[in-house]
Amino acid sequence: MSDEELVKRAQNGDVQAFMALAERYETVIFRLAFALLRHREDAEDATQDIFVHAFQRLQTLRDAGSFALWLRRLAIRICLRYRRRRITELEFVEPLGDEYENEILFRTDLDPETEAEKAELRMQVRKAIAELPEPFQIVVLLYHMDGLSYDEIAQVLGVPVGTVRSRLSRARAMLREKLAPFIQQSGSSSPNASFPEINSKQVMSDAV
Amino acid sequence: MRCEKFKSLLDAYADGVLTENESLMVAEHLQHCHVCQLRWQEVQELNRLLDDAFANFHPLPSQILRQRIKRTIFTQRLTSRRKVTVRRPAAIFAVAVVGLIVIVASLMHQPLLPSHEGHREREITESQTKIAKSEAPPKPPEPPGKPIQIPKQQFEPSTGVISNPPTVKRISVSLAARPKAKRQVAYRRAAAKPFKDNEPTGTEPSAKVVSETVETLPKAEPRTETILISVEKIIPTNPTEPVPPAMVYRVLDAPVRREITVLPPQGAIAQPISIAELTIPSLSRP
């Protein structure tokens, strides 16, 4: 059953339909909450609040087809409220997921050392994203983690598409700076770039 | 300078959100600008890192989260007149246990009929009497009202038990906002003496509640609190006697002690057992 149909049923008081929606989006919303809060219990509490609020305010959702975006909008608002509330407790934040990389390390078909390095790199990238200022962090998460388009992100955040584009561009500029060592390492080891490798020193001297 | 312009477009170019003309311009520029080619590689590499960073990032919530959501939503529907946000099941339990002390007590016979007026005043404590008098000055005698009869089909003469299904009575009490730690409120049925099953009838109370539970829900709005009182069973000592629906509750809220008289809404007098929704208008703190 489509989101739209379930939302309409839920708007007519069908709690089971809403629970079906909750089941569908529980992990997505929890992941977003966890990425924003970096604290498992907070993320679970926030996820619960998000769905309870969604249930309360479901009547205000006019376009039933945009439930997923509307839910994310609610999620961001509630998660930011959680973050502001616990501003003095930031030392308890989790490192964003090394526990989730463990499964890979136990696979026998992969080289543990290489995979450990990759897992470490992924964690560093997530950490760098988590350290971005709030608006930039959110656009990066919505684009790269949730896979939303510029239009969808604009709808979630209630901003023009141009703002999404500029925020994403600035966020990446900041990340390029933070992750410069990793980009150089991985860039030098990946021959799959779209353009042939060129001598960077030569290029820079050409540019000067 | 020209490169700076293209540099700002590379992210959007990678995301495929440029116009056709802009895309063509960037593609053409990349063909012959080695500096921008290097930047383009960086853009691609960063995007790959960012996408890859979340490829294995699938934290799962605990298995009880969905149950928590479901329970909260159903609780809300039960108390749909108020907005309630319950954070954890433990919180419900803690508030229910710590927030309220439930005391099983006898049903206060508080006759609404004038013929029971004297008895009522004997039963109510002194402070209750004060409140009752201040709120409701003595009325001139009225002709006796219609006696209330317990529905026979629900009354078991052999046991003296009315086999009513559990009745949930909802009482809304307005309480002033106060620190969470001091939100412990106890509600006690105000009948001073417990009634015995074999107690002679007449002017004595004709029924009593043998069991009731009180549950409080977390405060939803700054000045309100919802209490659900479930009356499980009512035993009349004399089924022919009317069972007055009015009851007195005593709120033990240190340091203030206060009594509330819960009166049924108009028209509820004919159905004394199936307790309707009662509302205490206000209970403002001094």
Image: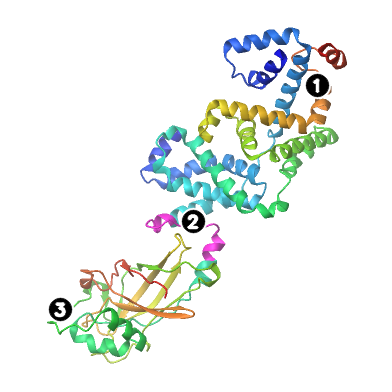
Based on the displayed image, in which of its 4 quarters is residue B33 positioned? top right
Which type of secondary structure does the marked residue at label 1 adopt? loop
Residue B43 point in image, percent of width and height:
72, 22
Residue A186 point in image, percent of width and height:
81, 26
Residue found at x 82% / y 26%: A184
Q: Chain of mark 2?
A: B
Specify start and end residues of the magenta stretch as a single range: B76-93
Above or below, comparing residue A164 to residue A85 in the picture: above
Image quarter where the C terminus of chain B lies is bottom left
Which type of secondary structure does the marked residue at label 3 adopt? loop
Both labels 2 and 3 in a single chain: yes
Above or below, comparing residue A179 to residue B277 in the picture: above
Marks 2 and 3, Cα distance to the nearest angstrom?
44 Å
Residue A133 point in image, percent of width and height:
66, 39
Residue named by callout 1: A190
Based on the displayed image, in which of its 4 quarters is residue B87 positioned? bottom right
Q: Name the residue furthest bottom.
A: B200
Residue found at x 51% / y 42%: A74
Above or below, comparing residue A106 to residue B242 in the picture: above
Residue found at x 83% / y 36%: A112
Q: Is residue B196 visible?
A: no
Which type of secondary structure does the marked residue at label 2 adopt? loop
Q: Name the residue furthest left.
A: B143
Amino acid at pointer 3: Gly
Q: Disc 3, disc 1: CB below 8 Å?
A: no
Q: Disc 1, disc 2: CB below 8 Å?
A: no
Q: Is disc 2 surrounded by few (<14), some (14 to 19) or many (20+) residues within 10 Å?
A: some
Marks 1 and 2, Cα distance to the nearest angstrom?
51 Å
> Which numbered dot is residue B145?
3
> Which numbered dot is residue B85?
2
